[in-house]
Image (cartoon, rainbow, N blue to C red):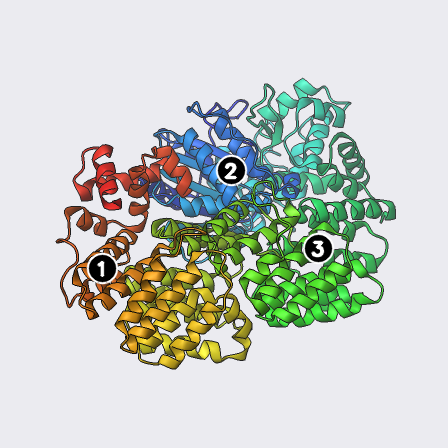
C-alpha cells in the first residue's frame, strides 16, 4: 500500500475527476504555500467511496516537481504499535538519495516523540531539496501510536516545503488521535459530499454508458447519494452496447452498493471472483503466493491480469521484488465482503488464519466462527494478559475486544470490554476509551466497573472523582482477587499523590506491593512509595526509596520506567539538576508499561525546569516546546495547565511579560476544569514568578500565600518547596515582611539537599533578610558563603547569579564599590547570556543606575532580535553543529533549520556560517 515516485504498473490510466474542481483548487493552493516553505496539512474526509483517493491522485499528477511519499492504512496493522510509522520510514529509506545508515525499526515501547524524531529524519533524507507531497490514506485504519507520531511530526515541521494530505472516513476522530483537532494554523479540512447530477452524468459518460434519460440520471444520483464508487460500479455492469441492465435503472428501490458491486463482479470469470473474495477477506495487499493458497481453483496469472485490466484490482508498489495485489478501493472491499455468502466467508477467514501469523491471524479466527467459541476466548484471554503485562497494552485491548466478540458467557463479554477500556486508558487512548463510557455506565455494579469509571474520570482530568471510584473498586476486589486489588491500589496511589495526599498514597502503594507479584504493578507501587514519602518528608527522603535503581539510566526495564521518572523528578526537587536531566531525558524516549502512566509529559516538563535552573535557558525552551507538541498528541487536557504555567515562567524570566500573561491566562482557564487543586498550585507559582520579575513583592506574597494556606497543598508545597520558597523568602524580605521571609528560609533550610541549589538558595534568602534588617556586613558574609558552595549536582547558574547581585547590593552598603562592581558585572553577564533581562536590569540598578557593563554591543542587539527558534538554531551553530545535527536535536527537518538560518543571516548581515558561529561564541563568553 506504499506509494512513491515509481510508475503505476497495472493502473488502467489517469483517474477521471469530476465535480471536485473546487476542492482540487483548494488543495493546489495549499501546495503552492508548501512550495514557498510554508508547510500545510489538509484533512480530507468523507464516507467510503466518495472520491478521496481519486482527488489526491489527481492532485499528485498536478505536482510534477514534488517528491511523493505515502502510506495507506491496513486494518490488521491497527494492532501493531508504530506499524505504519515503520512502513513509512522503510519506504523513505528505500527511496532516499542520502547515504546515511538505515534507521532500525521503531520499537513498540518507544514514545511518539522519539518515533517522531526518527520519522522526521527519514523523511528529510528522502525529500532532499524538493517539495514533498506526503499522502496518508485510510488514516482511520492506522494504529494509534503511528497517528500520534504523524501528528507530532506535523506539529514540528512548521517551515518546511511539505504538503501533507490525510484521507480518512472519520475526520474528527482522526484529527483528534493525531492531536491536530481544533483551529490550528497550517491545518485545513475538506469534507467531500456526493456528486451532483451534472457530475454524475459526466462520470457515466466517461464510462461510456449510453441511453440514459435525464430523469434516470437524477434517479441514479439520488439512489447513490452521488457516491462515485457506487456510480462507477453501476457503470461497469453495462453490456457490450454500453447500456445498464434495465432492472438496475428502472427499479423502484435503489440497488445497494453491495448488489451493484456483485453485478459488476459477475462480469468476471469465477476464478477472478474467487481472487476478489480472497482480497476482500484478507483486507490487505496479498502476494500471488497467498492468493494462490486462498483461491487454489483460479488460474492466477490470467485471472489477476483480467482484474487489473478491468479496474477491479491494482498492483501495490512494494520494496520487495514482487508486487502485492490490492483492491482498488476500501468501499469496494466492503461491498464485496458483504456479498460473500456467510459459509464461504467463514471458510476464507479460516484459510487466512492458517496462513497468517499472530497478531493478524486472530481477527480471522474470530471471523471464521459461526457461533461463540469458549476455547478461542480462553486463548485470547491468555495472550491479552501476556501483552498487558509484558508487551503493548493497546494490543491487549484489541484482544480483549476479541474476547467480547466470541465468549459464550455474556458476563465474560462484558468483563472483557471493561478490561479493554481499562487498557485503552493505560495506553493513553483517552478519546477511544471515553467513547465506551455509555457502555460502562450501563453495566451492572462491580469492582471492574468501578475501576473503569475511575479511569474514565482520570482521562477527563477529574482525579478526585477517579480516586473515589478506585477506592470502591479496591474494596470490591479485596476479598478474593489480590492481583486486581493490587493493581487498582497502585492506580489509586498515583491519583492520591496527584491530589497531594502523600500518606494516603504511601498506604495505597504499600497495600499494592504486599499483594502482587506482577513486575509492572511492583514498579508502579515502588514509584508511588517514593512519591508518597517525598510528599510527607521531602524529596531527599523519597529518593532514598529508590536506591535500588542503578545510577546509569540506560537500559532501565520498562516495568521500572515510572520509578526512573520519579527519581528524576525528585533529584531535580532536591537540587541534583544534572542527575535529574539524565534520568528524565532517557525516560522521555520510552513508554512505561504504566497503570495510569504519566511519565512522558511529566519527564519533559521537569527536564525543562531543571535546564532553566542550570542556566540552559534556550535548551529549556526547546524542551518545553517539545512538551507542548507531545502533550498535544498523547496527553490529557489537564497537562496543558502545567505546561502553560512553565511557559509563562520562562517568558517572565526573559521580561516578555505580555507573552507570560497570555500563557498564564491559558493555564488559569484550563486549571478551572479539573476537580483537584494541583493545576492551580502550578498556576499560582507562575503568577508569582511574573510578579517577582516585575519586582512586585507584595504580588508574590499574594499569589503564594493563599496557595500555602490551603490545607490541600500542605504536602504538595513540601514536595515543590525548592522551586517557590526562594521566591517567597526574597519577596518577603524586600517587602519588609520579615516573618514570611524567615518562615520561607526555615522551610528551605530544612530540605535535605542532594545538590548545591538548596544551599545556595538558602544563603540568598538569608542574605536578603539581613539586608532588610540593615545588617549589610552580615549579609555580605552569608552571600559570600553562598558563592563558595561547590557546584554539586550541576551548577545552579540562575540562583548563584542572584546571590552575586545581592552581594553587590550589600557591598555598596558597606562602601566596597570595587568588588560590588565586579560582582554586579559578573551577574549581569550571566543573566544576559540567559536572556534574563529583568534580572540583568537588577544588577545595573544595584549601583544607583550606573551600568556595570559597557554599552549594549552589536552582538547583543542582534541576539535580542532573534525569535526563540532562531536562538536555538544559532546557539547550536555556535557549538559547531552541522545542520543535520541541529535538526535532530530540535526534532525538526533540515529545511526548518535552513529557514531559521536564512532569517538569522538576514538579521545579522552575515555572509557565512563561520561569522555567525564567531558572534555566538563571543556572546557566550
Q: Which residue is mark 1?
A: 824
Tell me the distance, in whole angstroms, between the alpha carbons under discs 1 and 3. 53 Å
Could you tell me which quadrant the C terminus lies in? top left
The x, y position of residue 776, in whole percent, is: 26, 72
Mark closer to the chain start, 1 or 2: 2
Q: Which residue is mark 3?
A: 521
How packed is label 2: few (under 14 Cα within 10 Å), some, or many (20 or more)?
Answer: many
Mark closer to the chain start, 1 or 3: 3
Tell me the distance, in whole angstroms, between the alpha carbons under discs 3 and 2. 62 Å
At horizontal 66% and vertical 25% (from top left) the residue drawn is: 287
State the mark number for residue 204.
2
| Element carrying mark 2 | helix
The x, y position of residue 716, in whole percent, is: 53, 70
Q: Is residue 913 visible?
A: yes
Q: Examine the rendered structure and indicate whether residue 898 appears above or below residue 482.
A: above
* Quarter where residue 902 is shown: top left
The x, y position of residue 225, in whole percent, is: 55, 50
Amino acid at each position: 500500500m506504499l506509494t512513491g515516485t515509481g510508475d503505476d504498473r497495472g493502473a488502467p490510466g489517469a483517474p477521471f475527476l469530476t465535480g471536485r474542481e473546487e476542492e482540487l483548487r483548494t488543495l493546489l493552493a495549499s501546495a503552492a504555500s508548501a512550495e514557498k516553505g510554508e508547510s500545510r496539512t489538509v484533512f480530507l474526509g468523507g464516507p467510503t467511496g466518495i472520491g478521496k483517493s481519486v482527488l489526491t491522485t489527481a492532485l499528485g499528477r498536478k505536482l510534477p516537481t514534488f517528491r511523493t511519499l505515502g502510506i495507506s492504512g491496513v486494518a490488521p496493522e491497527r494492532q501493531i504499535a508504530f506499524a505504519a510509522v515503520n512502513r513509512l520510514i522503510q519506504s523513505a529509506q528505500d527511496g532516499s538519495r542520502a547515504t546515511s545508515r538505515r534507521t532500525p525499526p521503531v520499537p513498540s515501547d518507544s514514545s511518539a516523540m522519539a518515533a517522531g524524531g526518527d520519522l522526521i529524519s527519514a523523511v528529510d533524507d528522502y525529500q532532499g531539496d524538493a517539495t514533498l507531497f506526503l499522502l496518508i490514506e485510510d488514516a482511520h485504519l492506522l494504529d494509534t501510536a503511528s497517528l500520534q507520531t504523524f501528528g507530532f511530526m506535523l506539529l514540528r515541521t512548521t517551515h518546511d516545503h511539505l504538503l501533507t494530505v490525510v484521507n480518512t472516513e472519520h475526520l474528527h476522530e482522526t484529527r483528534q488521535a493525531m492531536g491536530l483537532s481544533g483551529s490550528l494554523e497550517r491545518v485545513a479540512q475538506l469534507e467531500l459530499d456526493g456528486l451532483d447530477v451534472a457530475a454524475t452524468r459526466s462520470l457515466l459518460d466517461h464510462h461510456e454508458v449510453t441511453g440514459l434519460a435525464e430523469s434516470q440520471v437524477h434517479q441514479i444520483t439520488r439512489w447513490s447519494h452521488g457516491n462515485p464508487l457506487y456510480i462507477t460500479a453501476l457503470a461497469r455492469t453495462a453490456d457490450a452496447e454500453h447500456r445498464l441492465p434495465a432492472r438496475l435503472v428502472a427499479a423502484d428501490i435503489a440497488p445497494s452498493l453491495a448488489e451493484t458491486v456483485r453485478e459488476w463482479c459477475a462480469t468476471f470469470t469465477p476464478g477472478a471472483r474467487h481472487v476478489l473474495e480472497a482480497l476482500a477477506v484478507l483486507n490487505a495487499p496479498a502476494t500471488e503466493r497467498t492468493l494462490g493458497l486462498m483461491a487454489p481453483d483460479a488460474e492466477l496469472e490470467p485471472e489477476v491480469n483480467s482484474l487489473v485490466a478491468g479496474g477491479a484490482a491494482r498492483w501495490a508498489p512494494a520494496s520487495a521484488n514482487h508486487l502485492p495485489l490490492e483492491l482498488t478501493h476500501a468501499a469496494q472491499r466492503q461491498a464485496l465482503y458483504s456479498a460473500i455468502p456467510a459459509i464461504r466467508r467463514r471458510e476464507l477467514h479460516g484459510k487466512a488464519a492458517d496462513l497468517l501469523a499472530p497478531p493478524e491471524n486472530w481477527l480471522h479466527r474470530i471471523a471464521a466462527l459461526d457461533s461463540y467459541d469458549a476455547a478461542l476466548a480462553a486463548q485470547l484471554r491468555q495472550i491479552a494478559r501476556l501483552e498487558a503485562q509484558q508487551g503493548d497494552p493497546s494490543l491487549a485491548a484489541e484482544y480483549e475486544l476479541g474476547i467480547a466478540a466470541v465468549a459464550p458467557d455474556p458476563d465474560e463479554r462484558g468483563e472483557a470490554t471493561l478490561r479493554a477500556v481499562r487498557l485503552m486508558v493505560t495506553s493513553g487512548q483517552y478519546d477511544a476509551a471515553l467513547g465506551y463510557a455509555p457502555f460502562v455506565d450501563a453495566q451492572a455494579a462491580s469492582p471492574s466497573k468501578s475501576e473503569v469509571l475511575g479511569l474514565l474520570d482520570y482521562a477527563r482530568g477529574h482525579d478526585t472523582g477517579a480516586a473515589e471510584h478506585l477506592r470502591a473498586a479496591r474494596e470490591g476486589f479485596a476479598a478474593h482477587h489480590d492481583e486486581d486489588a493490587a493493581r487498582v491500589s497502585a492506580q489509586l496511589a498515583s491519583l492520591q499523590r496527584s491530589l497531594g495526599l502523600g500518606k494516603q498514597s504511601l498506604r495505597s502503594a504499600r497495600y499494592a506491593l504486599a499483594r502482587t507479584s506482577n513486575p509492572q504493578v511492583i514498579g508502579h507501587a515502588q514509584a508511588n512509595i517514593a512519591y508518597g514519602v517525598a510528599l510527607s518528608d521531602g524529596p531527599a527522603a523519597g529518593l532514598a526509596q529508590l536506591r535500588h535503581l542503578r545510577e546509569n539510566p540506560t537500559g532501565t526495564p520498562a516495568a521500572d520506567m515510572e520509578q526512573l521518572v520519579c527519581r528524576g523528578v525528585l533529584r531535580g526537587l532536591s537540587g541534583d539538576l544534572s542527575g535529574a536531566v539524565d534520568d528524565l531525558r532517557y525516560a522521555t524516549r520510552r513508554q512505561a508499561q504504566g497503570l495510569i502512566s504519566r511519565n512522558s509529559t511529566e519527564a519533559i516538563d521537569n527536564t525543562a525546569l531543571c535546564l532553566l535552573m542550570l542556566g540552559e535557558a534556550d535548551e529549556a525552551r526547546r524542551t518545553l516546546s517539545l512538551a507542548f507538541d507531545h502533550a498535544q498528541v498523547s496527553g490529557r487536557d489537564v497537562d496543558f495547565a502545567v505546561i502553560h504555567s512553565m511557559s509563562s515562567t520562562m517568558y517572565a524570566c526573559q521580561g516578555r511579560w505580555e507573552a507570560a500573561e497570555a500563557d498564564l491566562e491559558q493555564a488559569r482557564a484550563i486549571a478551572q476544569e479539573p476537580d483537584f487543586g494541583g493545576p492551580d498550585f502550578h498556576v499560582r507559582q507562575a503568577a508569582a514568578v511574573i510578579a517577582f520579575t516585575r519586582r512586585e513583592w507584595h504580588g508574590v506574597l499574594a499569589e503564594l500565600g493563599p496557595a500555602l494556606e490551603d490545607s490541600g497543598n500542605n504536602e504538595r508545597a513540601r514536595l515543590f518547596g525548592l522551586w517557590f520558597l526562594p521566591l517567597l523568602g526574597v519577596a518577603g524580605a524586600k517587602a519588609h515582611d520579615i516573618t514570611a521571609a524567615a518562615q520561607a528560609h526555615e522551610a528551605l533550610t530544612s530540605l535535605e539537599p542532594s545538590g548545591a541549589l538548596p544551599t545556595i538558595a538558602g544563603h540568598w534568602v538569608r542574605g536578603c533578610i539581613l539586608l532588610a534588617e540593615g545588617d549589610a556586613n552580615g549579609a555580605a558574609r552569608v552571600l559570600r558563603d553562598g558563592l563558595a558552595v561547590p557546584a554539586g549536582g550541576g551548577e545552579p547558574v540562575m540562583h548563584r547569579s542572584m546571590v552575586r547581585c545581592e552581594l553587590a547590593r550589600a557591598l555598596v552598603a558597606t562602601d566596597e564599590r570595587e568588588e560590588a562592581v565586579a560582582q554586579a558585572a559578573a551577574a549581569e553577564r550571566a543573566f544576559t547570556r540567559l536572556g534574563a533581562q529583568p534580572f540583568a536590569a537588577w544588577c545595573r540598578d544595584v549601583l544607583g543606575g550606573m551600568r556595570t557593563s559597557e554599552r549594549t554591543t552589536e552582538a547583543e542587539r542582534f541576539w535580542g532580535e532573534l525569535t526563540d527558534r532562531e536562538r536555538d538554531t544559532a546557539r547550536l551553530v555556535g557549538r559547531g553543529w552541522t545542520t543535520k545535527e541541529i535538526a535532530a536535536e530540535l526534532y525538526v527537518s533540515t529545511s526548518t533549520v535552513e529557514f531559521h538560518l536564512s532569517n538569522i543571516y538576514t538579521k545579522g548581515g552575515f555572509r557565512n556560517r563561520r561569522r555567525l558561529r564567531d558572534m555566538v561564541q563571543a556572546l557566550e563568553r
